[in-house]
């Protein structure tokens, strides 16, 4: 189970806040409605304790262990397309250190010409 919040610049996708994401993903809507295709992303993961505001939404106790991610996704020209923060419930033994990843050519829903 996870909780994600995405931030998309309003001038890149005007009116996106009024769209339904019930039957389509953010990737699908950005491509189909706005012609926007992610080209790369930088993501950081770290172990966290679930904060008070997220615990009821995730149906866990405050302070439960979770894996959090922060991602900045960019268009091919380098402009930021969206950023998100996420908390995913995972059980993991021991200490988990921060790690970063870069996502490029294998990015899902990448436009093919």
Image (cartoon, rainbow, N blue to C red):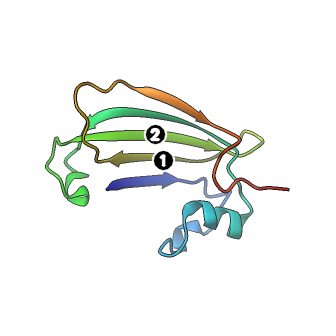
SS class of the residue under badge 1?
Answer: strand
Residue appearing at x 19%, y 48% in the figure: 52
Left or right: where 40 falls relative to 45: right
Q: Earlier in the sequence, mark 1 or mark 2?
A: 2
Q: Residue 65 at what x, y percent from top left?
A: 22, 39
Farthest residue to the right: give it. Answer: 113
Look at the numbered discs 1 and 2 and tell me whether their residues touch, using CB distance below 8 Å: yes
Report crowding for label 1: few under 14, some 14 to 19, many 20 or more residues within 10 A (C-alpha): some
Near-viewer residue (79 or 103): 103
Q: Nearer the viewer, residue 95 or 60?
A: 95
Instruction: Tell whether 101 sits left or right of 51.
Output: right
- Residue at 36% over, 32% down: 46
Q: Residues within 10 Å of mark 2 (few under 14, many from 20)?
A: some
Q: Residue at x 50, y 71 (%)?
A: 21
Relative to 102, say whether 89 is above or below: below
Residue named by callout 1 = 84
* Residue 33 placement (x, y as % from top left): 69, 70
Where does the N terminus fall, quadrant-wise?
A: bottom left
Residue 26 occupies quadrant: bottom right
Tag 2 residue: 70
Eyeballing the image, is 81 above or below 42? below
Could you say where residue 111 lies in the image, as x and y percent from the top left? 76, 55
Label 2: element kind? strand
Where is the C terminus found, in terms of image quarters? bottom right
Looking at the image, is 42 positioned above or below residue 8? above
């Amino acid at each position: 189970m996870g909780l994600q919040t995405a931030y998309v610049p309003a001038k890149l996708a005007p009116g996106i806040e009024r769209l339904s994401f019930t039957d389509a993903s953010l990737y699908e809507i950005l491509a189909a409605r706005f012609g926007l295709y992610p080209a790369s992303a930088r993501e950081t993961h770290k172990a966290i304790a679930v904060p008070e505001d997220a615990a009821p939404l995730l149906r866990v106790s405050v302070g439960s262990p979770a894996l959090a991610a922060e991602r900045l996704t960019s268009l091919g020209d380098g402009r930021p397309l969206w950023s998100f923060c996420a908390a995913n419930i995972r059980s993991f033994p021991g200490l988990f250190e921060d790690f970063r990843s870069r996502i490029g050519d294998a990015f899902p829903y990448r436009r093919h010409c």
